[in-house]
């Protein structure tokens, strides 16, 4: 049995990843602010054990107890591999510095960087004594490697995710843990819709992103999810690796 902990499963890429993993051979712990009833129904239909946790990851002081609660449900006699996928995130605020709301900036960095850090910290604490392979996947962005006008918190937090990945991997060398960062590319999700609904004054690359949608150049969440799962199943990723979807698209 493989055990997966996935954040941000109410929609978008997180939902697609969870749906691809629904199987009698897998047990899922899904986390988002609102339950995904379609996902729960799919798991019931396919005889997959799925526990859903309605949880706001910006409540960082409660993450420790959440992880303990989840790990306590792992059957240590049957589990063969445990995977944490830190997918939840936000691009907002889409505004340049000096025009952004302070609380929006705080929420962005909390959700995109602080929460995954605390998830990883407690995931390691509570799974350390389970003698199986453990993977940690951090969903990053191409924006981690370049400055984008209007995305200062997003670029900064995703750059932080990449260095968090590399540092955690260094600390976990020669253990049963591996840590990866994966940038999915430009995926057709509600996040992209919010980007297209911003203003050119706040986001100078607006027309490029509108063009990507109009020209059919957005990746489908299901395709990206399938590729990520394939890479994990085939053990094709290196501990500490920073990967981008374009490396694996034919």
Image (spheres, rainbow, N blue to C red):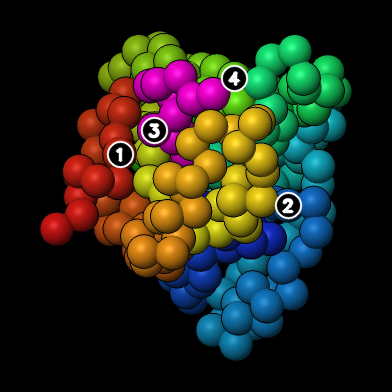
Local packing at callout 3 (Cα closer than 10 Å; few below 14, some 14-19, many 20+) is some
In the image, what residue occupies the spot 28% across and 28% down?
241
Q: Secondary structure at mark 3?
A: helix
Horizontal side of residue 117 vs 138, given as left or right: right
Task: Give the CA separation, mark 4 to mark 2.
Answer: 25 Å
Q: Residue 69 bears which disc, if any?
A: none
Kindly tell me whether residue 230 is visible in this rendering: yes
Mark 3 and mark 4 lie on one chain; the one further toward the N terminus is 3
Horizontal side of residue 238 vs 197, given as left or right: left
Q: Secondary structure at mark 4?
A: helix
Q: Is residue 147 magenta?
A: yes
Which residues make up the magenta segment? 139-149
Q: Which residue is mark 4?
A: 152
Q: Nearer the viewer, mark 4 or mark 2?
A: 4
Q: Residue 142 bears which disc, if any?
A: 3
Q: Which residue is mark 1?
A: 244
Q: Residue 32 bears which disc, if any?
A: 2
- Residue situated in front as seen by the camera: 104 or 65: 104
In the image, what residue occupies the spot 60% across and 87% down?
45
Task: Give the CA separation, mark 1 to mark 2.
Answer: 24 Å
Marks 1/3 in contact by CB < 8 Å: the verdict is: yes
Kindly tell me whether residue 115 is visible in this rendering: no
Local packing at callout 2 (Cα closer than 10 Å; few below 14, some 14-19, many 20+) is many
Question: Please, which residue is most extreme toward the left here?
Answer: 250
**Residue 183 location, x and y as percent?**
39, 39
Task: Give the CA separation, mark 1 to mark 4.
Answer: 20 Å
- Residue situated in front as seen by the camera: 243 or 65: 243
Horizontal side of residue 91 vs 53, given as left or right: left
Q: Identify the image quadrant of residue 29.
A: bottom right
Horizontal side of residue 96 vs 236, given as left or right: right
Mark 1 and mark 3 lie on one chain; the one further toward the N terminus is 3
Q: Secondary structure at mark 1?
A: strand
């Amino acid at each position: 049995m493989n055990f997966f902990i996935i954040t941000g499963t109410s929609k978008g890429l997180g939902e697609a990843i969870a749906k691809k993993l629904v199987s009698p051979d897998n047990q899922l712990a899904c986390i988002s602010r609102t339950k995904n009833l379609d996902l729960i129904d799919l798991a019931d239909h396919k005889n997959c054990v799925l526990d859903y946790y309605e949880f706001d990851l910006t409540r960082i002081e409660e993450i420790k107890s959440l992880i303990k609660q989840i790990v306590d449900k792992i059957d240590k006699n049957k589990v063969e591999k445990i995977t944490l996928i830190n997918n939840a995130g936000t691009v907002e605020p889409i505004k340049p510095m000096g025009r952004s709301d302070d609380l929006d900036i705080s929420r962005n960095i909390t959700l995109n960087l602080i929460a995954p850090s605390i998830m990883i910290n407690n995931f390691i604490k509570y799974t350390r004594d389970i003698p199986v392979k453990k993977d940690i996947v951090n969903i990053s962005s191409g924006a981690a490697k370049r400055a984008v006008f209007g995305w200062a918190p997003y670029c900064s937090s995703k750059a932080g995710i990449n260095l968090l990945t590399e540092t955690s991997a260094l600390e976990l060398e020669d253990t049963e843990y591996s840590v990866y960062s994966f940038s999915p590319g430009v995926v057709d999700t509600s996040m992209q819709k919010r980007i297209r609904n911003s203003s050119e004054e706040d986001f100078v690359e607006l027309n490029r992103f509108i063009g990507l949608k109009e020209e059919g150049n957005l990746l489908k969440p299901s395709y990206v999810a399938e590729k990520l799962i394939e890479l994990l199943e085939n053990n094709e990723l290196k501990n500490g690796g920073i990967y981008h979807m374009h490396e694996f698209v034919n």
